[in-house]
């Protein structure tokens, strides 16, 4: 807990505290004092002696005590001096609320950089500048200029947008959503999402980590940290700037370089981050994670007092790939003993509109006895006889009695009529959603998180490779400023990483030809190899589809004869013989470099599938075997590789291997900025894959 | 307004009125009396004289007055008699609240049918049975057993689920959403969505029609009515039972036959119905339509006081295909005169976090001057200086001053802090959404509706056809119980509707062959035509790819010679010569019959595109030319037809024509239950399309 003295310092100084109620420097002092903070509050303002009954120092240096956290609300030009003063007071953390930095342009960005460097020298960690501050709900300490302080809870929230932060605080307060920590990151000159996620991993007050992010600062480190954290606590993120229009707004907003949306999508997948689309989704999911256990399987039961909402929930389960549990015959029999005959004893279980709390409770008890049911959704509409509060209590009791810890989410639909019931549910940690679809989505997130945690720790496979050769080729090309590699060199690089390219060789005579055939096998293509012949086919210098020794010899001699006849003066190196890859599918493996996350590997089927259907998948290198398999499974056209329409399945294992080898290659050589194997010929299962063509671009 | 006496009758009888407060028969009386109803209330109960201070009649026949609307809350077995009694009292409408009909099984269904028939004889229109009743908010009359009566407004809502209805009423009341009419349809023995939509078309109190539907009763009529209504008022529908799991729940719930989700999707598209996914979406959209005008174009401006929400809105616009208006240079200049330099003068326009109402107002004024901006989204987060109510008022004033009628939606984000502002917005008919994404979706629906209304009335094209031949073929096959048509007959049917099939003919000699070539052109396939030869290629009886006269003559003689040599005894009819379609793409046109909507026409690209990618589109016959074009444009692989990758574009016009002809064919002949043209060969632009193979199945 590196940030203990940040979130709950023993002393806080407000530099730029103000008597003027309309100023942020006043609001912050007021908020600190009103939040119930128990540490020392030290105010600094050269022009006043007292603010809100608290002594005011002329300067930081006048303060006798040490300062754990210094909050700066002064014009940007005074920050540097304030930091220097703080360094003499053993200050560990500073929050710079003041604006006038990166967000204003080049000059501000320069000042921000200088301040960050200076703070680093002094060993002071910085939040901001240009931020709202932070709130710790357990310390408690409201070190922000937002007057809204929702109740204390287990959800930590960080925001890259201060304005969105204020809206979220207001929203959380209005909807009784409890928070543990709130941080507005501002320009992220120092403290960013990586520091905070790591800190919250060990924070006992936080069960769920949530964030609004416009762009991350260090993609690789972000992925490393998130992969670790998500195995223990869910991280739910809204990432803005997804589309072109959005991305433009990002760059004009905070100057953050917004990595491409594909890169973020891949990074989130590879690190188990749950992505929310809207603030509402974010808190819907967060509330579900806050107090519910993770399910042990995917079978759920729906209990409802109305058909319509039952259908809505069933539809949503189907769309989200959640199993409606098959209700066991013995369970059905037991339900029949007390549910009216018009009820439904299969999923969704309909207890009917006249159900009192007791009928619901019996149903819960019977359902909870079935260990093959891993989660429950309870739906309720406020009908004439409905007992909303009683049903909520019945649910709590049935859960208690069963002794089981399975996730339960509810949708008590309506407004005033269901309020008492919903409040009770919230008080015991059961999240209620205003519509069934949202309840299902929340459950889906719990299931996904459960799957993610179960995934074994997997190492990155290492293949033998000849790095020396590759180094030498790149060195040579960079020296000569040839950043687009030639075909033969690109092939040599693949070969150095044991990725097959078509066999080929140049035969000076028919004996050579037979030797080459030992590697290529039939069929082959024969081409005249001569520096003097540009249009080989015009002189009869090519023969394709050569299938056996007889044809080989005949073609060999015919080509030589043809050429001799047409161009008797031409110099002849020999005849090139190249393997013809048969019975194959064509796929594409591509690589390009994202400014945030580095090398992204792309996979798709060749031709129109990539070009027109854009049916491709992405992951960030280095990838694991599971990532590689998921990449292949993710494309819609994967069925074509698995053997659709009576065809033999393709050698998917060999694609997995090539993907991993490419991942290793680009990780070994960061100078690769772009690379395409197009096509990669994939033969039938067990017979391998061969890189038909490859293009590599490097940078200095 | 056929239903005037239903929604606002001069007299209402409650048959089965009760003194017992726990009974529905009591709640209904109570609701009627409390709703402010000004007509006569007539109570019927043989066992009591008075309920809630109102006289009670022993029997319907004791009532002196006539009864406009009779509400029945009596056991199902007494309904028939009550209807007969009512018929003597000139009753025009009845609401049967009682359950125990179709929803309980066969016996109940039979009773329901008998009652519906009897009512028809008496000229009484029925709502229900097994329903919640209805509410008219303007009459006013609460003729339901739901005690919740939201405020009066302009949104009409009908529900096929009573339970969902109660939740919606409670929800509307809690969220201050005003309704004009509320109807719970129950089992729809008589009055259904078609009657009500038609009625609401002319209802001055209703601006927006909304519905929760599990299945419609008469698909064709439903489409006819909705096409008409949606040109004047938006219809927003939640259709449940979308997926397999959902559909199962539907059939066990109300016994309604749930048409396939594809058919509903197509029907909604063809009739301009707006589909909502959830109750929340439904009312989000409805509130936008309630008081906002439709936009005249797709260019919108976003005004925000915070970057984050601006990005969210931009992202959502991009995803929904809404243009962020390019702000004109003169507008930018004007904005620069009063917005701080750190603001953003392009879309989204950022007035910054410290904006007071006045800065917002000036911005609105400048934006509203630009006639190329067709709609506005206003975003606000509650920051330190923000004046929520003032900003709401500023918006109203700027709109007023501008004299323009453009749609405006807002997202004042947060809770308590923004409440006053949001309430003010609602009071002047501007819908506020808690997150920017929902504001954008609402605006998108307004834009779509505007496009839909602008669409010209389009007639269905009629092509020449030889119906007689088709009739004759079907008659013959049905007589012989051959419901799967033979290949030749199927081709004859296409020919009768002027859909091209490959040219072919049988040549007895080489002169015949040359004649046939005049029709087919080269290349052609030659095949021996003999009743004695099954495996034509085994005896050298086939030659493909014949390209000229010389090859034709040679092939003709070779085949005859081959056959004579292998099977000297075989009877020879001649040699069949068939056109080989060259340079073509393959598409599929299919037809099947949906139980609700009738013939559905499917279109997709041949082979894997249909089989594996399921990239197909559907419309319900008869289709118009626009439908046909949309079907083609809707598939993802349409780019392949438009000439991707340097290929020549295909003859899309000829596909449009074949689709229309097939639509005409199946409309002329309802006995067709299934039909596939697979493949339809499509040649390059201007060169037509040819049905390669066709399969037709008919029913008696």
Image (cartoon, coloured by chain):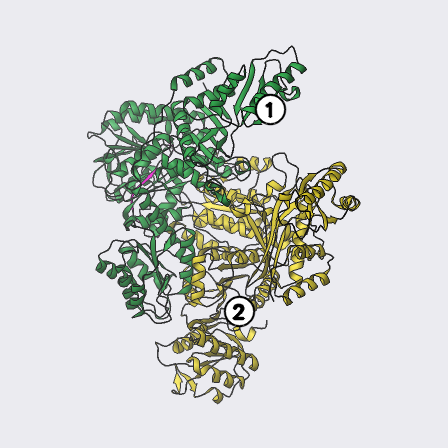
Chain colours: A green, B yellow
How far apart are the alpha carbons under marks 2 and 1?
74 Å
Q: Secondary structure at mark 1?
A: strand
Task: Answer whether residue A178 is magenta in the image.
Answer: yes
Q: Nearer the viewer, residue A399 or A122?
A: A399
Q: Please indicate whether residue B336 sits to the left or right of residue B656 in the image.
A: left
Given the image, what chain letter belongs to the residue carrying mark 2? B
Instruction: Kindly identify the residue that appears in the image at 39 percent across and 45 percent down.
Output: A167
Location of the N terminus of chain B by quadrant is: bottom right
Number of residues whose C-alpha sits closer than 10 Å to that of mark 1, classed few (under 14), some (14–19) or many (20 or more): some
Q: Can you say whether B615 is above or below A399 in the image? A: above
Number of residues whose C-alpha sits closer than 10 Å to that of mark 2, classed few (under 14), some (14–19) or many (20 or more): many
Q: Can you say whether A490 is above or below B496 in the image? A: above
Q: Which residue is mark 1?
A: A543
The x, y position of residue A261, in whole percent, is 45, 37
Task: Answer whether residue B447 is magenta in the image.
Answer: no
Q: Is residue B316 visible?
A: no
The x, y position of residue B129, in whole percent, is 46, 74
Question: Residue B521 is drawn in which quadrant?
Answer: top right
The x, y position of residue A390, in whole percent, is 28, 65
Q: What's drawn in magenta, residue-wise?
A: A175-187
Given the image, what chain letter belongs to the residue carrying mark 1? A
- Mark sitting on residue B192: 2
Q: Can you say whether A200 is above or below A557 in the image? A: below
Q: Please indicate whether residue B202 sits to the left or right of residue A92 in the image.
A: right
């Amino acid at each position: 807990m590196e940030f203990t003295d940040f979130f709950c310092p023993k002393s806080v100084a407000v530099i730029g505290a103000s008597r003027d109620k309309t100023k942020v420097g006043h609001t912050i002092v007021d908020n600190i004092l009103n939040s119930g903070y128990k540490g020392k509050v030290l105010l600094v303002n050269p022009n006043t002696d007292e603010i809100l009954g608290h002594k005011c120092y002329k300067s930081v240096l006048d303060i006798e005590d040490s300062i754990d956290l210094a909050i700066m609300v002064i014009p940007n030009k005074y920050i540097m001096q304030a930091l220097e003063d703080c360094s003499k007071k053993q200050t560990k953390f500073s929050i710079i609320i003041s604006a006038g930095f990166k967000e204003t342009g080049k000059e501000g960005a320069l000042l921000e950089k200088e301040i960050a460097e200076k703070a680093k020298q002094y060993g002071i960690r910085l939040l901001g500048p240009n931020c709202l501050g932070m709130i710790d709900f357990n310390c408690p300490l409201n070190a922000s200029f937002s007057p809204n302080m929702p109740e204390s809870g287990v959800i930590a929230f960080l925001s890259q947008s201060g304005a969105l932060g204020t809206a979220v605080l207001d929203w959380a307060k209005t909807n009784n959503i409890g928070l543990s920590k709130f941080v507005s990151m501002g320009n992220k000159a120092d403290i960013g999402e990586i520091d905070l996620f790591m800190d919250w991993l060990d924070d006992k007050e936080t069960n769920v980590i949530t964030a609004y992010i416009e762009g991350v600062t260090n993609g690789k480190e972000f992925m490393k940290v998130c992969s670790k954290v998500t195995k223990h606590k869910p991280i739910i993120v809204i990432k803005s700037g997804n589309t072109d229009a959005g991305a433009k707004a990002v760059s004009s907003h905070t100057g953050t370089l917004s990595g491409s949306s594909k890169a973020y999508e891949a990074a989130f997948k590879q690190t188990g981050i749950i992505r929310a689309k809207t603030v509402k989704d974010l808190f819907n999911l967060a509330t579900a994670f806050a107090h519910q256990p993770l399910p042990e399987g995917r079978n759920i039961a729906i209990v409802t007092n109305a058909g319509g909402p039952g259908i809505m929930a069933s539809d949503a389960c189907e769309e989200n790939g959640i199993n409606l549990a098959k209700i066991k015959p013995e369970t059905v029999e037991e339900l029949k003993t007390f549910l009216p005959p018009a009820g439904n004893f299969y999923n969704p279980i309909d207890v009917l509109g006249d159900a009192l709390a007791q009928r619901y409770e019996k149903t819960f008890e019977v359902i909870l006895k079935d260990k093959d049911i891993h989660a429950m959704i309870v739906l309720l509409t406020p009908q004439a006889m409905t007992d909303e509060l009683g049903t909520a209590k019945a649910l709590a009791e049935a859960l208690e009695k069963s002794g089981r810890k399975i996730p339960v989410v509810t949708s008590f639909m309506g407004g005033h009529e269901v309020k008492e019931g919903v409040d009770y549910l919230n008080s015991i940690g059961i999240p209620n959603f205003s519509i069934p679809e949202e309840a299902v989505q929340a459950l889906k997130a719990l299931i996904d998180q459960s799957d993610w945690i179960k995934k074994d720790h997997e190492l990155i496979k290492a293949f033998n490779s000849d790095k020396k050769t590759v180094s030498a080729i790149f060195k040579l090309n960079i020296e000569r400023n040839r950043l687009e590699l030639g075909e033969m060199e690109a092939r040599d690089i693949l070969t150095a990483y044991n990725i097959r390219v078509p066999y080929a060789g140049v035969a000076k005579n028919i004996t050579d030809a037979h030797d080459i055939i030992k590697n290529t096998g039939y069929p082959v293509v024969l081409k005249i190899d001569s520096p003097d012949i540009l249009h080989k086919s015009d002189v009869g210098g090519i023969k394709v589809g050569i299938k056996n020794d007889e044809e080989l010899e005949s073609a060999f001699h015919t080509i030589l004869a043809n050429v001799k006849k047409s161009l008797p003066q031409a110099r002849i190196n020999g005849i090139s013989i190249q393997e013809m890859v048969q019975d194959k599918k064509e796929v594409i493996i591509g690589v390009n470099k994202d400014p945030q996350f580095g090398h992204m590997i792309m996979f798709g089927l060749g031709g129109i599938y990539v070009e027109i259907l854009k049916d491709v998948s992405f992951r960030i290198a280095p990838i694991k075997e599971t990532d590689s398999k998921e990449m292949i499974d993710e494309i819609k056209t994967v069925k074509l590789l698995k053997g659709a329409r009576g065809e033999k399945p393709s050698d998917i294992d060999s694609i997995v291997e090539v993907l991993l080898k490419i991942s290793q290659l680009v990780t070994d050589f960061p100078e690769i900025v772009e690379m395409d194997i197009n096509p990669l010929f994939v033969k039938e299962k067990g017979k391998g894959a061969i890189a038909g063509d490859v293009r590599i671009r490097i940078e200095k």
